């Protein structure tokens, strides 16, 4: 029992990893734990719209563990010009440390889900990625483009970074988002060159 409790208490630190979106109606930034909870529910709600049949339990497990590496590596804005390979390596080291607190069966299961998400090679992983990429856009669309405006993100950056994975995993969701993004681009939410 103690290793599981140690793991659960250690992952409580995910609540302290700040992201760039604000929860609707609040004047603070969301944390990665809130993000993980919300996308797990979004994925469950969108299961009938997945591009291919998916195992919802595996999807939710992936979404609940996919950002745990940020406890050690921190969160990086999706649109940032950064060394993504180095960020992923730091996140991998973080999840290996965290999952190493668990008994072998749980460690192996969670690491397999994290790796499956990261590799994007299964229908479940592609769907999970679609939902993960969609949620910040949905928050921005509900909040006047809040993090896009604050960070000077351009329309083409959003479409380039979130369009392919969302379309691959949940085409109906991308069809909805593409239309909404175009509506907001016309309102001037995005930076120069939009």
Image (cartoon, rainbow, N blue to C red):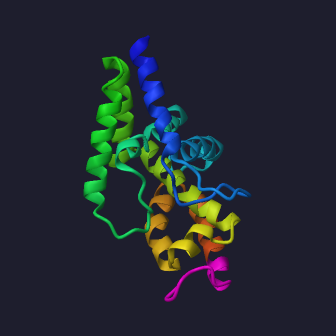
Look at the picture and state if 5 lies above or below 99: above
Where is residue 175? Give x, y as percent. 60, 66
Queried whether the magenta region covers residue 187, the answer comes back as: yes
User: Range of the magenta residues?
Assistant: 182-194
State left or right for residue 192 relative to residue 173: left
Image quadrant where residue 77 sits: bottom left
Look at the picture and state if 176 lies above or below 61: below
Residue found farthest to the bottom: 193
For the point 51% across and 55% down, the residue is 19
Q: Nearer the viewer, residue 87 or 106?
A: 87
For residue 29, say whether it is visible: yes
Quarter in which the N terminus is drawn: top left
Q: Nearer the viewer, residue 45 or 74?
A: 74
- Is most of the magenta stretch helix, strand or loop? loop
Residue found farthest to the top: 1
Where is residue 60? Give x, y as percent. 52, 37
| Image label count | 0
For the point 29% across and 34% down, the residue is 96
For the point 50% across and 44% down, the residue is 16
For residue 53, say whether it is visible: no
Where is residue 111? Give x, y as percent. 34, 33
Where is residue 28? Give x, y as percent. 63, 56
State left or right for residue 76 relative to residue 35: left
Queried whether the magenta region covers residue 70, the answer comes back as: no
Q: Nearer the viewer, residue 51 or 93?
A: 93
């Amino acid at each position: 029992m103690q290793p599981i409790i140690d793991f659960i208490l250690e992952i409580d630190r995910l609540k302290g990893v700040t992201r760039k979106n604000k929860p609707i109606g609040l004047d603070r930034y969301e944390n990665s734990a809130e993000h993980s909870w919300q996308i797990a529910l979004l994925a469950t709600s969108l299961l009938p719209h997945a591009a291919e049949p998916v195992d919802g339990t595996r999807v939710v497990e992936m979404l609940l563990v996919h950002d745990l590496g940020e406890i050690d590596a921190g969160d990086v804005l999706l649109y940032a010009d950064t060394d993504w390979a180095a960020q992923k390596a730091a996140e991998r080291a973080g999840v290996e440390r965290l999952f190493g607190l668990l008994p072998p069966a749980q460690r192996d299961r969670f690491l397999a889900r994290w790796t499956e998400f990261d590799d994007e090679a299964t229908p479940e992983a592609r769907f999970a990625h679609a939902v993960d990429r969609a949620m910040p856009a949905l928050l921005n669309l509900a909040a006047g483009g809040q993090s896009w405006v604050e960070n000077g993100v351009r329309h083409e950056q959003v479409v380039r970074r979130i369009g392919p994975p969302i379309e691959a995993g949940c085409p109906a969701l991308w069809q909805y988002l593409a239309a909404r993004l175009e509506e907001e681009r016309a309102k001037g939410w995005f930076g120069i060159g939009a």
